[in-house]
Image: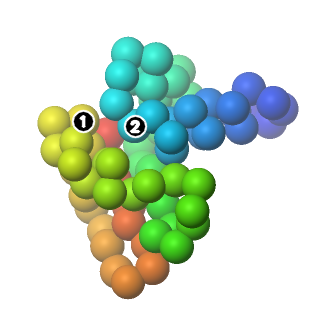
Amino acid sequence: PSGKEPLLAADRITHHPVGARTEALLDRYDIRYVALFKGYPGAHWRAFDRAPDAYEKVFENGAVAVFAPR
């Protein structure tokens, strides 16, 4: 998708990984993976790691963590 809405949705998901609004956005855009750069100060990848009921970690190395919504 293009435009403003998908960018705002991505921002919402990376800053608020859990919640009804986030779940709705994950469904709306059919998001199957969330890839996070560990060094990026705007999104805290550990928030996804602390939500095992909402996300499964499918990949991790020193720079990147990838989570799949449950």
Q: Residues within 10 Å of mark 2 (few under 14, many from 20)?
A: many
Which amino acid, mark 2? Pro
User: In x, y percent, where is residue 38?
Assistant: 46, 70
Residue 19's x, y, as percent?
A: 36, 22
Kindly identify the residue that appears in the image at 38 percent across and 66 percent down: 65
Q: Quadrant of the N terminus?
A: top right
Quadrant of the rendering where the C terminus is positioned? top left
Counting residues from the start of the chain, the first of labels 2 and 1 encountered is: 2
Residue that label 1 marks: 54
Tag 2 residue? 17
Q: Which residue is at a point 74% across and 26% down the rendered structure image? A: 5
Q: Nearer the viewer, residue 37 or 59?
A: 37
Residue 23 badge: none
Res. 63 in view: yes
Image coordinates of residue 57 in percent, x first then y, are: 25, 58
Q: Amino acid at mark 1?
A: Ala
Q: Is residue 66 left or right of residue 40?
A: left
Confirm or deny contact between disc 2 and disc 1 (CB under 8 A): yes
